[in-house]
Amino acid sequence: MNREVVVIGGNHHNTLSILRSLGEKGIKSLLIVLSPYDPKPFVGYSKYIQKKIVVTNINEISLAMYSLHTTAEKAIVIACNDCISSYLDMNHNNLSKDFVLPGSKDEGMITHFMDKGAMAQLAVKSGLNIPKSIIISTANPEFESITYPCISKPLVSKNGSKSDIVICEDESALRKYLNHCRCDKIIIQEYISKDIEFQLIGCSIKGGDKIIIPGVSIILRQPMNGNTGFLRYFPIKEFTYDKSSCFEFIRSTGYSGLFSVEFIRDKNGTDYFMEINFRNDGNSICVTASGMNLPYIWYLYNCGENIESELCYDSMREVLVMPEFQDFKNVKHRQLSLSNWLKDVKKTDRFMVFSKHDQKPFWMVVFKQFFH
């Protein structure tokens, strides 16, 4: 079992989580880093890399894949951001001749479901609740039917980032958001007063024939932008959710690969589907830390190996995971005391950048943040 694995991602702890999850199982990856602004990305310093190529444009990815792939067997591919997932999906017919790709067997299908309108329709059809939503043009918005507060986000996830998801308290805030928005269309969702925000990180095998969701993550400290905050992850057997509708939704997309599904639970206990990410999730190292290695399971399955021995649901444990650089911003902005933050650091089971077994990426971030 020595199949090549190609990890494609940005200069982000998301990519690092895959390198480490596979590396800790003895598998060194072929890495393609999409890094337009930094020719020496910190993820490229991980010791779990066999070879790497840094590209500045997404259209360079195919050439980089073929430059790294040298064996007769198809290389297994893992994507770590939305743009890359869409790129692989839109080039599926050509690339699938030489690579095992995440996605659907039908070219363009996953990109179709990245549209939050299409995503929401399928969610409702599958039996999931969604917040009330409308789609508006940023060039000619109509404000009359919008109630506030609301959540504004890009209609297609690959056209934006988590920082483009904003709560607008009134029309003035929404107009300000639209003035700075880079997307042609956005989706406006009803603001749900939440009890918790939770995420199901998993792996879909053979278009949803087998769906693996080992646990659930709950954000303990909401980040300033995005959904990567100090979090608690625990086994799925300790959590109640609409499993049948969730699994039906994933099966209906025809997707194979690593994924995450995001929900909000309101004060009355009703769960609302927010979105699915057709890629490895930025928080996914929490699953590996808890005891189940989803990237390795995806790799094993595509090597034709039996994965049952890796499905260790009963031995999984609760863990606390911290995105240390992101979380420290709470201290910098005086939203959290340094002493309380250090107490949380002491309790943390796994960090998203620091690893005592793979330290160079962490020190590269420190060097660039403090000396550049």
Image (cartoon, helix red, strand yellow):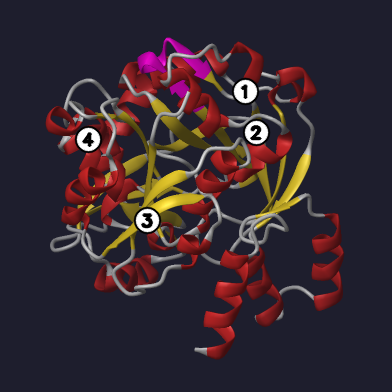
| Among the two numbered marks 3 and 4 on one chain, the one whose residue lies closer to the N terminus | 3
Q: Is residue 81 above or below residue 214?
A: below
| Among the two numbered marks 1 and 2 on one chain, the one whose residue lies closer to the N terminus | 2
Residue 209: quarter of image: top left
Q: Nearer the viewer, mark 4 or mark 2?
A: 4
Q: Could you tell me how far apart the alpha carbons at marks 3 and 4 are, in whole angstroms?
A: 22 Å
Dot 4: within a 10 Å radius of its alpha carbon, few (fewer than 14), some, or many (20 or more) residues? Answer: many
| Among the two numbered marks 4 and 1 on one chain, the one whose residue lies closer to the N terminus | 4
**Residue at mark 1:** 241
Residue 181 in the figure: left or right of residue 276: left
Dot 2: within a 10 Å radius of its alpha carbon, few (fewer than 14), some, or many (20 or more) residues? Answer: many
**Residue at mark 2:** 216
Magenta highlight range: 203-211
Q: Nearer the viewer, mark 4 or mark 1?
A: 4
Q: Could you tell me how far apart the alpha carbons at marks 2 and 3 are, in whole angstroms?
A: 32 Å
Q: What amino acid type is highlighted by mark number 3?
A: Lys
Q: Find residue 265 and name its label.
A: none
- Are discs 1 and 2 less than 8 Å apart at CB? yes
Q: Find residue 89 and name its label.
A: 4
Q: Picture coordinates of residue 336 (x, y %)?
A: 76, 73
Q: Secondary structure at mark 1?
A: loop
Q: Secondary structure at mark 4?
A: helix
**Residue at mark 3:** 52
